[in-house]
Amino acid sequence: MKASIFLDQIKNIGIQTIAGVPDSTLKQFCDAVCLDGGKTFQHYVTANEGAAVGLATGAYLAKKRPCLVYLQNSGLGNIINPLASIANQEVYGIPMLFVVGWRGEPGVKDEPQHIYQGKVTCALLEIMDVPYAVIDSETTEAQLAEILEKARGQFGDNRQYAIVVKKGTFEKECAFTWTNGYELVREQALKTILEQVYKDSYIVSTTGKISRELYEQSDALYGNHDRLFMTVGGMGHASMIAYGMAQADENRRIVCIDGDGAAMMHMGALAFLAKQSPPNFLHIVINNAAHESVGAMPTGYSGQTYAQIAKACGYLDTYLVKTEPELKTALCNVKNKRELSMIEVMTSLASRAELGRPKESARENRICFMDAYDQVKIDV
């Protein structure tokens, strides 16, 4: 199915506003929305999926038109609260259409963080009283029109409706491409960071290509990735996982390597971390202004920086770097400091086509990391 045809049919049921968080399963859909450029739809990339439900609620209050909220199925957790306590028919009764990328569909090979989520995707919609239809590459235009008519009927009853999208549903059309203007390649930046911090720190990394590149670079540099905990799911929570470690043992140096999209998803963590001010915590945000791991759509905060926000929240030492020499200087400056610090690294969208994935399961990564943590005592 062409995503452009999907959008045409969405328009036919009165939807004018689209909001959500990008997903690789929905890449062609996301590209088509971006290429529309506001001619047909108002489009917003929100901080998280729950925020998209909030936006859709406000837009309905003002325009009396349901909105489309798109998300990866991992984002269902973020919408449960606003869906149950605001949008549900028994509360305010706000109609909206969910378009959900189905990662981890049973029987389809996928990454470990998607396995359980894939199993419970449809069950979550059922328990949240959201009727749904599943579409795939075999779904015809006529069948889609029928599905959307069912959705329109639910809207009339002040309810929501979901379309669950299987992998490979949308055809490749014109890809949406852009550049952010930064030159430092992320993988080179991560290699530089590892060279400076791996031997005397424990690292918690965020989901996506950041963890994949750290995994390969750590193995290349040291022959292992024992001190690397890869948070391959739970986007936006790496910094709090890292803090949980830092507060448990102030004699260990903990480094969180975050992404800009992940940091934005739960930005309140910055204020919390600043309040707690763990002296053994280094927060590194890799900022390429995009959700690059799932298709490189710009974030809703693209073009902005996090170092100033961290400083305003109360981080004691912050740096904004755009080159490798600047990164090395910042890493050198924080190396022997006992205070909460952030280094924000502005990087390009470049990544290797042959970039691999971790060979171990998430559980095996956790066990290996904990074993390394127990065996070696590192004093800050």
Image: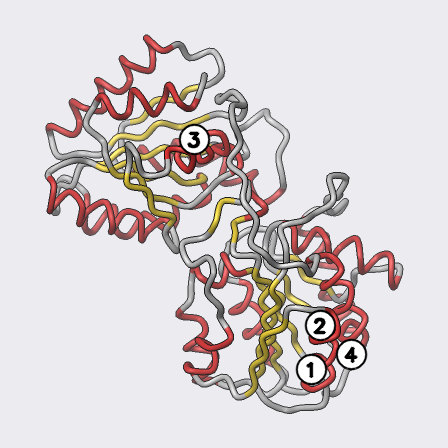
Amino acid type at image mark 2: Tyr
| Residue 324 higher or lower than 36, as above or below | below
Mark 1 crowdedness (10 Å alpha carbons): few <14, some 14-19, many ≥20 = many
Give the left or right position of residue 328, taking residue 314 as reference. right
Q: Earlier in the sequence, mark 2 or mark 1?
A: 2
Q: Nearer the viewer, mark 1 or mark 4?
A: 4
Q: Earlier in the sequence, mark 3 or mark 2?
A: 3
Residue 241: give x, y in percent of width and height. 55, 67
Mark 4 crowdedness (10 Å alpha carbons): few <14, some 14-19, many ≥20 = some
Q: Earlier in the sequence, mark 3 or mark 4?
A: 3
Point 70% across, 47% down: residue: 351
Nearer to me, 193 or 251: 193
**Badge 4 element:** helix
Mark 3 crowdedness (10 Å alpha carbons): few <14, some 14-19, many ≥20 = many
**Badge 1 element:** loop
Q: Quadrant of the C terminus?
A: bottom right
| Residue 177 higher or lower than 109, as above or below | below
Q: Which residue is mark 1?
A: 252
Amino acid type at image mark 4: Asp
Amino acid type at image mark 1: Arg
Q: Which residue is mark 3?
A: 32
Disc 2 vs disc 1: Cβ atoms closer than 8 Å? yes
**Badge 2 element:** strand
Separation (CA) of disc 1 from disc 3: 47 Å
In the picture, residue 309 is in which quadrant?
A: bottom left
Residue 6: give x, y in percent of width and height. 36, 22
Residue 259: give x, y in percent of width and height. 56, 60
Q: Which residue is mark 4?
A: 200
Separation (CA) of disc 3 from disc 4: 46 Å
